Amino acid sequence: MRIKSLTARVLLLTTLWSAVALVVIGLVISNIYRKSAERGFQDLLRAQLYNVINSVIIGDQGTLSGSPQLGDLRFAQPKTGWYWMVEPLGTYTATPLVSPSLGASTLPVLSVLEAPFDKNYERYYIVTDAFGNQVQVAETEVVLDTDGRAARFRVTGNVAVVEDDVRNFSHSLYFALVGFGVGSLVVNALAILYGLMPLDKARAALERIRDGASERLQGDFPREILPLVNEVNALIESNRRIVERARMQVGNLAHSLKTPIAVLLNESRVLERSHGDLVKSQAEAMQGQVQSYLNRARIAAQRESVLARTEAEPALERLVRVMRRLNADKEFELSVSPNLALAMEQQDLEETVGNLLENAARFAEHKVRVVANEAPAEMKGIDPARRHWVELVVEDDGPGLEPDQIREAMKRGRRLDESKPGTGLGLSIVSEIINEYQGRLELSRGPWGGLRASLILPGVTKDVA
């Protein structure tokens, strides 16, 4: 799975690296300590071995005597794995000397081939005593007198002491490394979050621009991303000028076509009825087509801008107030969520909702209702980058439309009821405007039995509305 968040990527990589590094460091330190402990253990046995050698003599009768005092009570306690012993070598016979801890037990001896002597004529090997203890043996052979009589000296230590020491050290080391690692990760995460905070501020500033709450990137940004901020602000300003120029051109075009179309409409009144009606109908159709394409051009220019913003409640209240005056026999209801704003030009919103209200008032029996709320999470528009959408519903208690009639009504210039006035362009114009804003229009039968028109429109967050 690809991680898209830069912060998450950096945190994941640093966490993985820290975890691997701490594990490797722990293993290396633990191994170094083990070798040091084993070397120290061997040095201790060697020192004890020579203490025993210095404490033992051979008498005139060839007897071994001596009582080594090694300063460790474990040599006096049975079954501890800490022993010393002195055994005669050669043809003379003498009673071996052993530590109280060994008693009458014996200790196996490895052959010289299995454990050879080193250059100091010492050898070290590990065996298991009669009590199941794994012990390390330090052994050497020493000539005790001028007659060449010699003895084998051995001192043993319990290997479990080294293992326990290494285990305790490793536990302490791992706890320390875990604490250090967690602390380092926390500090590292805070440093990364603090270091990337300007990028998050830039993202938030861009979202505010897209939602219509701001017109440019504002804030104190570090010099590393300041050029990017300046370029974005310059792009927004350039886009603003393009939009203004497009609006001016659209206005000029509308003004240049307004007079010729008006002349045609006036001339149609003085012509013969058959010819006059034909010219009038074509001029009106041309007027509607021109206005529609002018609106599309203006909306297309405006859609590239991220600064459009219209407060929903006052705009809808004005439309409903006008419709009440024009349709005194109809009841109009309006419900708008507080602080609701749309990322649309006010003119586009009024034209869209105005067309729907005209249709609803034309076919309603008694009442029309307009409801505007923030759209549920599952109801989104076409634009995946926008997170905030508004659902605006216009419904009436008229006869409504069947599914096949709804498809016909959406076609440009189609009128399902020729007895009602109109050009048949209303719903198609609404659909075109909504599509330009990356929204959605849905027609269905409402709870009152009439037509229910649901608009999904780009919105602005409530916290900046």
Image: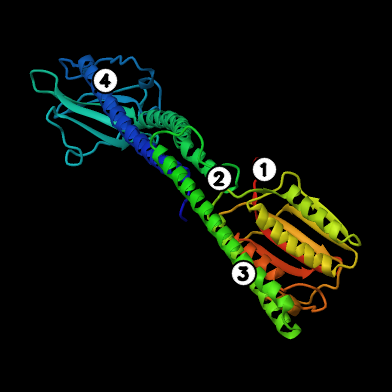
Residue at horizontal 60%, vertical 47%? 211
- How many labels were placed on the picture? 4
Q: Are marks 1 and 3 in contact (CB under 8 Å)?
A: no
* Gap between marks 2 and 4 measured at Cα: 82 Å
**Residue type (three-letter) at the residue carrying disc 2:** Ile
Disc with the residue nearer the chain's start (3 vs 4): 4
Q: Position of residue 244 (x, y in %)?
A: 53, 52
Residue 209 image label: 2
Location of residue 99 by image quarter: top left
Identify residue for label 3: 260
Taking 258 as reference, is 228 left or right? left
Identify residue for label 1: 465
Disc with the residue nearer the chain's start (3 vs 2): 2
Disc 2 on helix, strand or loop?
helix
Disc with the residue nearer the chain's start (2 vs 4): 4
Disc with the residue nearer the chain's start (1 vs 2): 2
* Gap between marks 3 and 4 measured at Cα: 121 Å
Taking 158 as reference, is 15 left or right? right
* Gap between marks 3 and 2 measured at Cα: 41 Å
* Gap between marks 1 and 4 measured at Cα: 86 Å
**Residue type (three-letter) at the residue carrying disc 4:** Gln
